[in-house]
Image (cartoon, coloured by chain):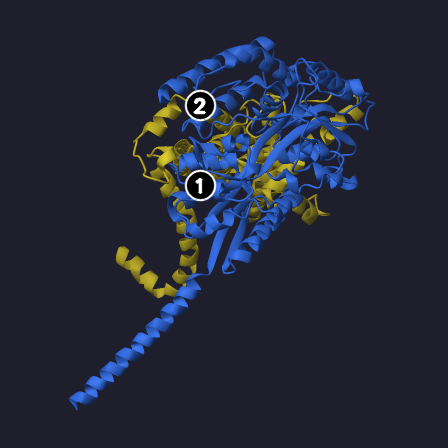
Chain colours: A blue, B yellow
Amino acid sequence: MKRKVLISLLIGLLALGCIFAGGSAETKSSSEKKVITIWYEGNDQRLPFFKAAEAEMQKDYPNYSINAITFDNATIVPKSLQAVTATGGVDLIFNEASRLMITYQQSGGGFEDLTDIVAATKNNGVITASDRSICSARDKLIVFPINRSNSGLGYKTDIIEISEDQIPNTWNKFVELGRRYKEAGVNGWTLHLGTNPEQIFNLILTAGNDIHGFWIDKTPKSNIPKYKEQMADIIELYTSKNAIWDRDAINEDFAAMYTKIQSSQAGMFRVGNWNVAGWDKENSGVGEFSVTTYPSFTDEAAGALSAGGVRGLALPKNAPEKEAAKVFLQYCLSEAAQKASFQTMGSCVDYGVVDTDKLSKNQKIFFDPNVKVVATDYYEGLFSYYPELLEAFQKSLTKAFSAKDRAEIISILDKLDIELNTIIAKNK
Amino acid sequence: MIITKLKLVRKYWLLYIFISIFAGISVVFGIYPMISSIYYSFFKGSTILTSRDFIGLSNYLSLIHDEYFWKSFRITVIFTTISVPVNIVAALLLSALLNYRGIKFGRVFFKLAIFIPYITPDVVGAVVWKQVFNTNGAMNSLLTIIRLSPINWLTSPGSAIGVLAFVELWKHVGLYTIIFLTNYQLIDKTLYEAATIDGASTFQAYRFITIPSLRPALTLNGTYAIIQFLKTFTVARIITFGGPNYSTNFLSYYAYSKYERMNFGSATAIATFLFFFILLVTFAGKSLATRRER
């Protein structure tokens, strides 16, 4: 009897062992299947890029796949912040580097340093120093660059005759052309002022005139006194009696601005590498236009396109599939992925994949190696109190764009200088 | 008293189950976020989602020194003070017109025409009105046709707030009108007959019979209008972005702009202040109405 019990026990244990061993084998093989969750801003135009990178990844890692989910801009930033700090559930977040930087700061450093990942990625030579600067916070590469957001000055060519020497690549020509558009019955220039009123200075001061730190620098300190006269000149494009700037811009965001441009209500406007191919199409509503560099105050050869930002992927420290996400990142610079990025988002970091013969008329300037590109200054990654500085700057600019005269604009800028230095002193 | 109420709950338990679904939704999506928001307003904004640094009333104290907050508060109060009586008076007039026995033909059409703006989605209405009042919009085109100068409807601080008041009037007057109209049906007609016999004029009948009879509707509409206008948001968000120069920067929009900048501490502090201010005004109004009834 005892023997029978013992034998039965042994057989039972053996059977259990086999089950667990088999189960473990199953568990091991099923644990090799990884699903990388990616959140991305914008619309499904981005999806082909992720799918292309996934396809490349699956050549070496067939059990890895992605689950890419899109959110609108207003939702993704707070949602990302919550995921990075508390709820988790996302492996990679795709957005403008500036927004990812803010998420990084607000989460107390919730993204991984991707320096080693980029170093291990094939084709990483396409990432420029400017890309790294935009994507880094205090020497840590927080964002893996996927594509660049560059812009230039668009001007309509089907409203008035514009000769070669009237192309608005200097300040005087820009103002003069704006005045001619106004006489022809359209707004001379438009750029939304309802949100981010500081953008205009990035375009004209930084890109057009290679002026960096026009409001604060990396120290940080306020540089307003040094550049307030140029800033007042630009603000007067809107406030003066002979203003060329669309008056309604004060109540517009970028969506309303695009509606205006695509209904040919503006003579000059910002053109991005992300929308130029679409606008070059016949039925885009923009009509005939050309693109040039942002105007220089002095020399027509000195202007440049604006490297407004970089879009990329950040890896949360609490990513559930962190190792798989790191693997995926290394395929984002593959030829197929970069081609998909160019085709769907109008840009990439590897310009080698771009077939320049197939570029549309106004796309060419963005891929012309002879055209100067100047990067916008980015301080999001440097100071945790940058949002407070930016808020003060934007509030003062909103007041300045409603000023009655130049004296009032200068007075507002002088007060802004004091306020910025107060914030800096308080936080240092 | 409590036992009686409990007995009633037992008796009608099935009905309570049905309404508790909506109560549950209100708690989850209304009361809980509200309490959370008040709670978060006592923490440093940048730490709300991480280590949560308790700072007591600092967020509220910083609002006291914020000139934009006081400007927002002033604009919100002035906007409400003007909009509420304008809406109520307009609704009274429209309901009197709709109730007038002379208007027999097309009464349903006019009721619909007045009420449809209320059921039109806020954003849709705001987007359309923005196009109408833009510098090159329909309104200025009309002025040009009749040989008048165009007006900077939305780009001048004074007129921008007027446009928003108009849009809100268009949007909300329908609801108030329908509520007044419904109460018109409940007024005892024999009172008017008696008044006529006593030699009362139309205006006297309106003042001494109609208005007192509409008091419950007046209280309801007044309370609703005060709450509605104190929390005005959509028109500022869609039409003016709080401008020009913060002239339409209502408290709710200011809280939202703080939230957009991820300044959660200030955003929740402003929202909490607005909540308690609306509560105070509503209770004050209710007390006044109750005292008058007595």
| Residues at marks 1 and 2, CA–CA distance in whole angstroms | 50 Å
Mark 2 is surrounded, within 10 Å at the Cα level, by few (under 14), some (14 to 19) or many (20 or more) other residues, namely: some
Q: Nearer the viewer, mark 1 or mark 2?
A: 1
Residue A11 — which label?
none
- Of A7 and A343, nearer the camera is A7
Location of residue A147 by image quarter: top right
Farthest residue toward the bottom? A1
Q: Quadrant of the C terminus of chain B?
A: top left
Snapshot quadrant of residue A243: top right
Q: Is residue B223 visible?
A: yes
Is there a contact, CB below 8 Å, between mark 1 and mark 2? no
Q: Is residue B61 above or below residue A272?
A: above
Residue B42 vs residue A216: left or right? left
Please name the residue that numbered disc 1 is placed on.
A116
> Does residue B43 appear left or right of residue A342 in this picture?
left
Compared to residue A165, the image places residue A97 above or below, namely below
Element marked by disc 1: helix
Q: Label 1 marks which chain's residue?
A: A
Residue A20 in percent (x, y) is at 33, 72
In-front residue for pair B245/A392: A392
Q: Amino acid at mark 1?
A: Asp
